[in-house]
């Protein structure tokens, strides 16, 4: 059963270095969730001693170069896809899921969390206004284009939480249970018309198809099987296809993305393309012409790993219906996570957990060029902009 854990207005969690949250008239808000409980030690995700609280950084991606416009505290986690952040289409609220938290009995360990923070982006300064209870281990979040419904994939109990959205208020509206606690629901995506949702399951390598009728969400019991450990997922703006990234086995093999054709009688995987080791982040440009992906590419391993790379990979593919063609790639920081497009498709942000930075990358339709970086207070673990 779901219940609201707390409801606070103007929560005193703001950490702003700027005197006022003041995005430009043409601002595009990107939200980066930063995990301070995770560092790589000899290639192992470990808890640092006395970690600082997790943070959320707000970035204006509508200006060049992108700039930080605020920061606040909210629990989150690098565990799970970097789609653990979602923003309503009107940019009024952001949702941030926390998959893991410090173990109260042993601060050197992590245990599954169940918190979803609701952040009021219109408040001055923005603040966490509610903390909602989800299933165990909330990860990827999907919000429909109408901004009225949210799905949260709960990796640790094999479920998806359903919430209605009215203004800035979330209300629990049920739960989808896949009947397998180890299914590992990881991320959820709505079709543009809001009538379908796809949920990746990295525990049993399936992609579930959900039917959506208003606020009624049901499991059709149909599913797709593509790569190993399907993870981040998104529909194209036209709704004729969806793209999913696969984490793979983490042994150095080159991992893949799947293209899902949703125009026929039933969704079906029709293409598989290789990207790099451990495909992590995935985002489709606003015009639907390109998809950008991050792959850790061995940067999360020790230097003696046979397929180690000091830097992660950012790759861009062009989209023509269900046909993808690789356009370009660039090397970014280590242990890469989320990625986001500017509205005009000329700038990308890509998260680097190792360096606690976001790479700023220019794209001219042919080449990717790293032009700068944004420093954040924590390991950037989740990144989204609003989908329209």
Image (cartoon, rainbow, N blue to C red):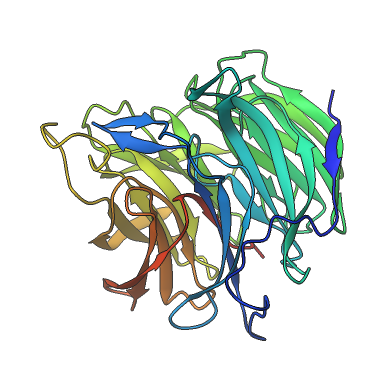
Quadrant in the picture for residue 101: top right
The part of the image, by quadrant, that contains residue 358 is bottom left
Choose top left, top right, bottom left or bottom right for residue 70. bottom right
Tell me where residue 214 appears, x and y as whole percent.
87, 45
Vertical side of 105 occupied by 233: above or below: below
- Residue visible at 56% across and 19% down? 183
Residue drawn at the location 58% of the way across and 42% of the way down:
76
Res 319 seen here? no
Residue pictured at 67% horizontal, 65% vertical? 388
Q: Position of residue 347 (x, y in %)?
A: 42, 74
Residue 347 in view: yes
- Camera-side residue: 379 or 92? 379
Q: Nearer the viewer, residue 336 or 202?
A: 336
Q: How many marks?
A: 0
Question: x, y (%) of residue 271?
Answer: 38, 43
Is residue 309 toward the left or the right of residue 134 in the image? Answer: left
Q: Is residue 229 above or below residue 242?
A: above
- Asked whether, in this view, residue 130 is left or right of residue 284, the answer is right
Q: Is residue 182 left or right of residue 94?
A: left
Outermost bottom residue: 25
Tell me where residue 289 appears, x and y as whole percent: 46, 67
Whether residue 74 sits left or right of residue 334 in the image: it is right
Q: Quadrant of the N terminus?
A: top right
Q: Residue at x 74, y 59 (%)?
A: 127
Towards the viewer: 227 or 292: 292
């Amino acid at each position: 059963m779901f219940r609201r854990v707390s409801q606070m207005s103007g929560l005193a969690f703001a950490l702003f270095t700027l005197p006022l949250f003041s995005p430009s008239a043409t601002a595009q808000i990107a939200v980066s969730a930063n995990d301070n409980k995770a560092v790589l030690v000899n290639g192992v995700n470990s808890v640092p001693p006395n970690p600082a609280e997790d943070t959320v950084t707000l970035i204006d991606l509508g200006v060049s170069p992108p700039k930080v416009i605020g920061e606040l505290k909210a629990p989150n986690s690098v565990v799970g896809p970097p789609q653990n952040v979602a923003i309503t289409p009107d940019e009024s609220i952001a949702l941030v899921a926390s998959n893991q938290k410090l173990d109260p009995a042993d601060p050197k360990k992590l245990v599954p969390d169940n918190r979803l923070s609701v952040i009021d982006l219109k408040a001055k300064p923005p603040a966490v206004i509610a903390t909602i209870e989800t299933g165990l281990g909330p990860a990827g979040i999907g919000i429909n284009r109408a901004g009225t419904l949210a799905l949260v994939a709960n990796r640790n109990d094999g479920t998806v939480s359903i919430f209605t959205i009215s203004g800035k208020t979330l209300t629990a509206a049920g739960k989808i249970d896949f009947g397998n606690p180890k299914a590992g629901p990881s991320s959820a995506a709505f079709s543009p018309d809001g009538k379908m949702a796809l949920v990746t399951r990295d525990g049993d390598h399936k992609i579930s198809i959900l039917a959506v009728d208003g606020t009624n969400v049901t499991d059709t019991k149909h599913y797709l099987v593509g790569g190993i450990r399907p993870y981040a997922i998104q529909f194209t703006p036209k709704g004729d296809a969806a793209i999913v990234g696969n984490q793979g086995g983490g042994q150095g093999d080159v991992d893949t993305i799947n293209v899902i054709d949703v125009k026929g009688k039933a969704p079906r995987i029709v293409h598989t393309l290789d990207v790099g080791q451990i495909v992590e982040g995935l985002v489709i440009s606003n015009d639907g012409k390109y998809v950008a992906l991050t792959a850790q590419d061995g940067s999360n391993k020790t230097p003696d790993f046979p397929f180690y790379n000091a830097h992660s990979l950012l790759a861009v593919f062009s989209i023509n219906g269900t046909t993808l063609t690789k356009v370009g790639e660039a090397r970014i920081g280590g242990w890469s996570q989320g990625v986001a497009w500017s509205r005009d498709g000329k700038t990308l942000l890509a998260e680097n957990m190792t360096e606690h930075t976001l790479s700023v990358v220019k794209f001219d339709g042919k080449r990717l060029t790293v032009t700068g970086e944004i420093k954040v207070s924590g390991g950037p673990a989740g990144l989204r902009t609003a989908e329209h």
